[in-house]
């Protein structure tokens, strides 16, 4: 079972993410991509529900596994990622050319309202501060059509199920009060942790390739390396941990045929993803909730983006799925004069 290590941020957020996210994913890109091949059912359902002809953004596309899910060519998704190595794989995802862009999830490189939909799957939890996570959501909202844009977010949850094989560590920052036994203290789980990834060396990989039994074992290990829930193929979905080794907290130099890399994650607490999304929306002067009923159009509830126009966001679905939190939202715009746009 992998060891997850709490980490206190001592570097700047940019240096922290460069060290524990961007550099690591560029290094492990080919091996990482081998574990990312099955779409998650809820995300595939979201993409299937979109209006044909829609244009969208996959922010943090990784190896681009969602780019081919396009309703037989009726959708067009652009992939964005910070990892040039993963984008080399993503640009031919599904055996066809895909349009991908090297860029930052916090960037405002898109024309406002450029996309009909946006997804960000297992990306925002790699940002190391609340402010940066909020800015990433703001960037997605900025890029979506204010009239009908649809958004889907996925992040790791602090509540991990048994299948994930991840045990979120607890913090040792509590002190007992007089008369309180140590065992009575509520355990506070660490939200900011390092998660190991084991990268087989070329020599070990080559050795496995020569033996059918080792190839079979390697394939099993490859499937077990995934840290995302996979599409179920039976009543007992296959989900396992990133690694079956226990690495030292901050070292990649270990006496092993494999190399261990540590990746930063922020595990989301209950309600945190919704709070983050709505905070980002309010910072953009969006009203929160469903669009107003026609009879209430003359009196806007929120800040008007321009005279006579109110814009907002409605969370239409959210929940927990196999150790992840997800949130689906829809943007709306009304003309506050008795007619809708």
Image (cartoon, grey):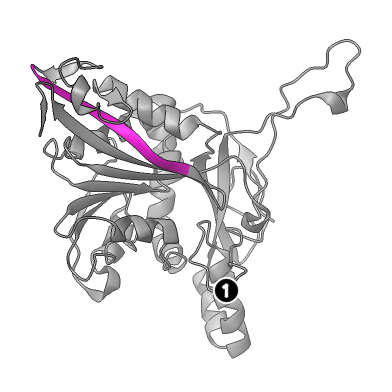
Residue 68 screen position, x and y as percent: 27, 67
Report the residue marked by disc 1.
234
Horizontal relation, residue 106 to residue 23: left or right: left
Question: Is 89 rendered above or below residue 217?
Answer: above
Among the 4 quarters of the image, the one containing residue 213: bottom right
Among the 4 quarters of the image, the one containing residue 223: bottom right
Q: Is residue 107 visible?
A: no
Q: Residue at x 25, y 30 (%)?
A: 291
Horizontal relation, residue 125 to residue 1: left or right: left
Quarter of the image with the N terminus is bottom right
Secondary structure found at label 1: loop
Magenta stretch, residue numbers: 307-318
Residue 245 screen position, x and y as percent: 67, 59
Q: Residue at x 41, y 53 (%)?
A: 25
Quarter of the image with the C terminus is top left
Q: Toward the viewer: 191 or 255?
A: 191
Q: Is residue 55 magenta?
A: no
Q: Is residue 203 visible?
A: yes
Horizontal relation, residue 316 to residue 229: left or right: left
- The prevailing secondary structure element of the residues shown in magenta is strand
Residue 261 screen position, x and y as percent: 53, 52
Horizontal relation, residue 292 to residue 2: left or right: left
């Amino acid at each position: 079972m992998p060891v997850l290590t709490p980490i206190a941020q001592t570097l700047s957020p940019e240096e922290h993410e460069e060290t524990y996210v961007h550099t690591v994913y560029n290094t492990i890109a080919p091996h990482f991509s081998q574990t990312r091949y099955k779409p998650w059912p809820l995300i595939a359902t979201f993409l299937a529900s979109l209006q044909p002809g829609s244009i969208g953004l996959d922010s943090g596309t990784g190896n681009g596994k969602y780019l081919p899910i396009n309703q037989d060519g009726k959708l067009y998704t652009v992939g964005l990622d910070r990892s040039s190595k993963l984008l080399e794989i993503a640009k031919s995802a599904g055996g066809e050319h895909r349009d991908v862009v090297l860029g930052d999830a916090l960037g405002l490189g898109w024309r406002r309202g450029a996309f009909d939909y946006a997804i960000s799957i297992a990306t925002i939890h790699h940002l190391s501060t609340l402010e940066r996570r909020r800015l990433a959501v703001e960037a997605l909202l900025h890029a979506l059509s204010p009239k009908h844009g649809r958004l889907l977010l996925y992040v790791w949850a602090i509540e991990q199920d048994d299948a994930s094989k991840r045990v979120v560590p607890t913090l040792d920052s509590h002190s007992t009060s007089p008369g309180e036994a140590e065992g009575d203290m509520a355990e506070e789980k660490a939200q900011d942790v390092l998660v190991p990834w084991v990268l087989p060396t070329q020599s070990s990989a080559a050795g496995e390739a020569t033996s059918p039994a080792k190839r079979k074992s390697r394939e099993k290990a490859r499937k077990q390396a995934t840290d995302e829930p996979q599409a179920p193929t039976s009543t007992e979905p296959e989900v396992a941990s990133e690694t079956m080794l226990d690495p030292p907290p901050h070292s990649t130099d270990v006496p092993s045929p494999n190399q261990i890399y540590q990746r930063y994650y922020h595990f989301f607490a209950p309600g945190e993803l919704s709070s983050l999304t709505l905070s980002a929306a309010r910072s953009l002067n969006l009203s929160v909730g469903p669009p107003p009923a026609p009879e209430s159009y003359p009196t806007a509830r929120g800040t008007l983006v321009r005279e006579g126009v109110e814009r907002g966001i409605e969370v239409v679905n959210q929940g927990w799925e196999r150790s992840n939190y997800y949130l689906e939202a829809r943007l709306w715009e009304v003309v506050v004069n008795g007619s809708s746009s």
